[in-house]
Image (tube, rainbow, N blue to C red):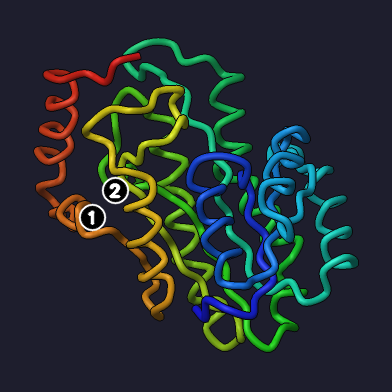
Amino acid sequence: MKLTDNTILITGGTSGIGRALAQAFHALGNKVIVAGRRKALLDEIAAQHPGIDGIELDIADAGDIARVAKTLIARYPALNVLVNNAGIMPFDNPAGAIDDATSRRILETNLLGPIRLTSALIEHLKAQPRATIIHNTSILAYVPIASNAVYSASKAALHSYALSQRFMLRDTRVTVQEIAPPWVDTDLIKKSGDPRAMPLDAFIAETMKGLATDAPEVLVEAVRPLRDNPGAHEHALVHGFNQSLVDQPIPV
């Protein structure tokens, strides 16, 4: 994508990867709008970075998405980049009973939210001289982590959706890119500072370089071996990956 002269909406833009992307795009002179549920955080980022706008949005609420989409189109007619970044990552245990309400919340946020918001904005994006949709999935879309089975499945589904969407938009002016982060040092799982996590600033720097290309998938080099999931041998890969986390668990 072209990294300048855009009007960009970033969901989940008040913390973590979303906030860092907002700041990186803003520093390049783009008009950036961050969406999130917490007004206090929206106000904070707008105050710290004059020129970044905030808009309240519950990405898990279909009615709220429809309302906000109409507001965005009216308020920002040049909106041409959508970054579907919002996500939640509760722990679960597929070897036991999984709370249905939690599973629904994950799927409403991580999968249906991006689908609904993209659907609400797609005709507007198609009318722009150039537009980009960026889906933030996860390396766990390819190598699931067993302790977050529903989250991993939601990201695998979003990856599949991005593949289909990219094909269906092939004859339009809208391109689709996907970023698939590794474990990045944010508060997504309410834990930060683990030395195994990739520093956020390093992730953003490498990701911005990738987004500046036409690559459909933007991956940091550290996760390419996991992305190259070895077909029929993936069972051993996934087992080994999860065993390594059992042997050295993530502190909670």
Label 2 element class: loop
Query: Label 2 amino acid?
Result: Tyr
Q: On screen, 107 above or below 225?
A: above
- At label 2, counting other C-alpha atoms closer than 10 Å, the crowd grade (few under 14, some 14-19, many 20 or more) is many
Q: Distance between the residues labelled 1 and 2?
A: 6 Å
For the C terminus, the quadrant is top left
**x, y percent for residue 138:** 38, 47
Q: On screen, 176 above or below 170?
A: above
Residue in the image at 33% along x and 62% along y:
206
The extreme top residue here reads 96
Q: Which mark, residue 227?
A: 1
Query: Is there a contact, CB below 8 Å, between mark 1 and mark 2?
Result: yes
Indicate left or right for 106 with 123 as reference. Answer: left
**x, y percent for residue 94:** 36, 19
Residue in the image at 63% along x and 55% along y:
10
Q: 232 or 184: which is nearer to us?
A: 184
Label 1 element class: helix
Lower position in the chain sequence, tag 1 or tag 2: 2
Q: On screen, 155 above or below 99?
A: below
Residue in the image at 52% along x and 56% along y:
21
Q: On screen, 16 above or below 214?
A: above
Q: Which mark, residue 142?
A: 2
Q: 98 or 81: which is nearer to us?
A: 81
Q: Which mark, residue 34?
A: none
Q: How many numbered discs sit on the rendered protein?
A: 2
**x, y percent for residue 57:** 76, 43
Indicate left or right for 139 with 57 as reference. Answer: left
Query: Label 1 amino acid?
Result: Arg
Q: Within the image, what quadrant is residue 249 found in?
A: top left
